[in-house]
Amino acid sequence: MRSWPTRPPWSRTAAPACERAFSARSTIFTGALAVTPATRSQILPDVPTIGESAPGYVGGGWSGIGAPAGTPREIIDLLNREVNAALADPTIKERLENLGSPVLMMSPTEFRKLIAEESERWAKVISSRRLSRSDTRRGARTMRMGASSRRSRCP
């Protein structure tokens, strides 16, 4: 097992900044209109979901841990047990929820199903809007060009 010099590398990421922002949520989010998940946020319980005013709308994000195809089932089951055990820890669960990330403990089969459902749902959105990869690249280029042109006008 690897030991870290002073603290793990992920402690230097955006997580501490997000945590500080959410800890000051009463002042930061006083003007929030809605949240995108299907259920109200635990950290912003008075803010409605978009689905409450636009029935059928569900958004939000999720994250998970995957393994390469062909990974032995025993390894997958071990990882799943250990990750779910960590997520069940009240300290970890509370920290994640305070960051605005609800904890969903799933089996590998449930997670595969979630990925398939989300992929299908967003594929429909992409095809109905006739979006392509070039559209997203073009949008990013436009944003960068706009930002650089604004900077160039500054004295």
Image (cartoon, rainbow, N blue to C red):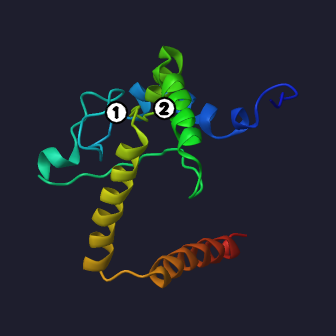
Q: Which residue is mark 2?
A: 99
Residue 78 x, y percent position in the rendering: 56, 33
The x, y position of residue 35, in whole percent, is 30, 43
The residue type indicated by label 2 comes to Leu
Kindly check if marks 2 and 1 are in contact, taking CB atoms under 8 A apart as contact: no
Coordinates of residue 124 in the picture (x, y in percent): 27, 71
In the displayed structure, 34 sits above or below 19; it is: below
Q: What residue is drawn where x is 20% and y is 54%? A: 57
Instruction: Judge depth for marks 2 and 1 and give the one in front.
Output: 2
Q: Quadrant of the C terminus?
A: bottom right
Viewer-nearest residue: 22 or 28? 22
In-image side of 21 versus 6 (left or right): left
Callout 1: helix, strand or loop? Answer: loop
| Residue 24 visible (yes or no) | no
What residue appears at the point 73 percent right and 36 percent down from the top-left corner?
12
Asked whether residue 41 is in view, the answer is yes
Quickly name the residue at label 1.
30
Residue at x 40% of width, y 32% of height: 105
Total count of labels: 2
Q: Is residue 144 above or below residue 80?
A: below
Q: Residue at x 39, y 25 (%)?
A: 26
Is 4 located above or below residue 65 in the figure? Answer: above
**Residue most extreme to the right:** 5
Identity, as a three-letter code, of the amino acid under mark 1: Thr
Left or right: residue 126 versus residue 74 is: left
